[in-house]
Amino acid sequence: MKISFYLALLLSGLFLISSCGGNQQEQKAVNDKNKTIEVSVDSLLTDASALDGKIVKFTATVDHACMHGGKRLTVFGSIEGKTLKVDGTEKSPKFVSGLMGKKVEIIGTVKKVPGTHVADCEVDEGNEIPEVAYVIECIDYKEIE
């Protein structure tokens, strides 16, 4: 009788441990979103290096949505001629071409990358490629109406 009681107790403990462990990835994503720093897109365009590695939340207007896999947005604020790249990740929703010209709210991590990372189909021949650049690795986004 005692053996079956202890066996049942052990099995219920194992079940409890295994059921709690399955949501760690989802819980990490929720915790990451709760640690966001609200910023303006203009502050990121001016000096993103101050927030390197931090999770930020901002609103911007979409200038370009990459048609090649839906994995990159180019957004802008009020600073003339300055744009910021937002890279999709495997966990973020794909960007759709219908976002062009729309306002979006983005949550993502500021990342320092080689300048060649941002040189894509939008770079004009006259533009110089910077040595380093900053992009936002998207965690989540939504269109603002």
Image: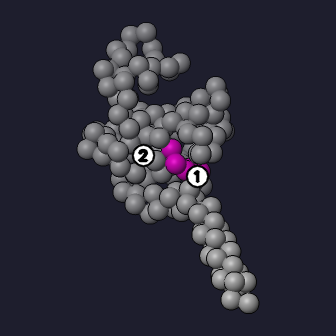
Which amino acid type is marked by label 1?
Lys
The structure residue drawn at horizontal position 60% and vertical position 69%, both measured from the top left corner, is 17
The structure residue drawn at horizontal position 34% and vertical position 38%, both measured from the top left corner, is 45
The residue lying furthest to the bottom in this view is 1
Is disc 1 surrounded by few (<14), some (14 to 19) or many (20+) residues within 10 Å? some
Residue 96, located in which quarter of the rendered image?
Answer: top right
Residue 136, located in which quarter of the rendered image?
Answer: top left
- Dominant SS type (magenta): strand
The residue identified by callout 2 is 109
Residue 84 placement, left or right of 5 = left
x%, y% of residue 34?
44, 63
Is disc 2 surrounded by few (<14), some (14 to 19) or many (20+) residues within 10 Å? many
Q: Looking at the figure, which quarter contains the N terminus?
A: bottom right
x%, y% of residue 145?
60, 55
Residue 63 placement, left or right of 131 = right
Depth check: give the residue in front, 85 or 15: 15
| Count of number-bearing discs | 2
Indicate whether residue 45 is drawn in magenta: no
Residue numbers of the magenta segment? 138-143
Tell me the colour scheme of the image.
one colour
The structure residue drawn at horizontal position 59% and vertical position 45%, both measured from the top left corner, is 91
The residue identified by callout 1 is 142
The structure residue drawn at horizontal position 64% and vertical position 71%, both measured from the top left corner, is 14
- Does the residue at mark 1 contact the one at mark 2 (Cβ under 8 Å)? no
Depth check: give the residue in front, 113 or 130: 113
Which amino acid type is marked by label 2?
Thr
Depth check: give the residue in front, 101 or 124: 124
Residue 104 placement, left or right of 97 = left
Residue 7 placement, left or right of 141 = right
